[in-house]
Image: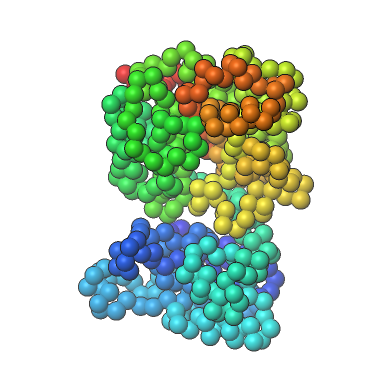
Amino acid sequence: MFASTTYTARRERLRKDLGSGLVLILGNNEAPMNYRANTYHFRQDSNFLYFFGLDQPSLAAVLDVDAGEDIIFGDELTMEDVVWTGPMPTIAEQAHRVGVHKTLPFNDLAAFVKKALEQGRTVHFTPPYRHDNMIALSEMLGQPVAKLKEMASVPLIKAIVAQRAHKTPEELAEMERAVDISGAMHVAVMKAAAAGKKEAELAGIAAGIATGMGGALAYGIIMSINGQVLHNHHHYNTLQSGQLLLGDHGAETAMHYAGDLTRTCPVDKRFNQRQKDVYNIVLDAEVSAIASLRPGLTYKEVHLAAARCMAEGLKSLGLMKGDLDEAVAQGAHALFFPHGLGHMIGLDVHDMEDLGEQYVGYSDDVQRSTQFGTAYLRLGRALEPGFVLTVEPGLYFIPELMDQWEAEGKFTDFINYGALKDWRTFGGIRIEDNVLITKDGHKVLGRPVPKTVEEVEGLRG
């Protein structure tokens, strides 16, 4: 964990921003896989980590804005617990390490919240996303589970986003570490990929490196010869000559800061000409997008510029045609680029997504598009120093989408459907890096991971 002063300063700013009320932050509990004692790997709630720093299950915390007091609720280990899990510092000792000087048993939390409600005090909480915490919150507040999301405190959400969106130097050090582990995962996979190997074998290499370097997976591994399936978590296929392998995977550090990188490599030792042509279109869009990043620029502008860049490349291949500015304005490019250019990243791979993307990625000045493709852009707002985001353009050849649009006669002025007949089995290419917005520009985090054609082929032997 960070120094206690980090957590006390974060809570003090939150207190100042809210002005009054009681902030309730529930930590996460163990989540059973198939019976109570066989659990998934524990992952603490990110807001609890950010403000209270303790990384163990069955804790909750209250930040009393009016009284200027913080309390951690949790139960001490029994001797039976110690036998199975080993000794740990007491809750009070752990709380002291994050600047909290009052602890109470977990069972006292419900009565504490009830008393605050009876006094007419505002109880601020964030939208719950785990069902055990939904039930607990429902019982404490006396409200149905279905109403909790709409009852979540917008002032608290905005105050948390205002803090967590701007990464401090100590956070950036963790994120550099996460990106470096992620990069090592990708280099190992690109070196190992070969015809006859299973996707699962390569996914195992990536997961092993994340664990072996002291981290864990930040999200489920995407390792697929079917790169046109954007979130493909199946690893059943055997690599074959002539295919591309898309790997989207990243590590989180022991303190849970995430890295999120994507690389695409040929199964063969070299790209063929068609693969190289499309790869360089995506690479040009990624490099250009990163080069443009600076405070004040909206990420929606960067997204549309990347779409325009790739549309130009597709036109050079005879796959798009006509007025490309109009094609992008109408959304014709989304046949090949149906997702957003990137998202915030930090303690969560999609940072603070549990709080609502409209608060994290958008603002009063920049509203989310309803257009297919651009609607999936998770970050559109103006960039500010301290933001860390992903830049991940891609081009995909999705037979089902191509068939639907052609049958509907969509965008015939911009898409050469006849030429697409020969591209149905191409797959997809995505390239992704993590970038910090600085006061006068940007910085790509982590040690460089090979991404030019020459660099990737250099790893392939």
In this view, the residue in front, 46 or 173, is: 46
In this view, the residue in front, 420 or 459, is: 420
Q: In the picture provided, is 412 more to the left or to the right than 78?
A: right
Q: At 58% from the left edge and 16% from the top edge, which residue is drawn?
A: 419
Residue farthest left in this picture: 83
- The image shows residue 459 at horizontal and vertical percentages of 36, 22
Q: Is residue 140 above or below residue 454?
A: below
Q: Is residue 433 above or below residue 284?
A: below
- The image shows residue 418 at horizontal and vertical percentages of 60, 17
Instruction: State which quadrant residue 455 falls in.
Output: top left
Q: Is residue 53 above or below residue 282?
A: below
Q: At 71% from the left edge and 42% from the top edge, which residue is drawn?
A: 369
- The image shows residue 13 at horizontal and vertical percentages of 63, 64
Q: At 51% from the left edge and 17% from the top edge, which residue is drawn?
A: 422
Total tally of numbered discs in the picture: 0
Residue 243 seen in the figure: yes
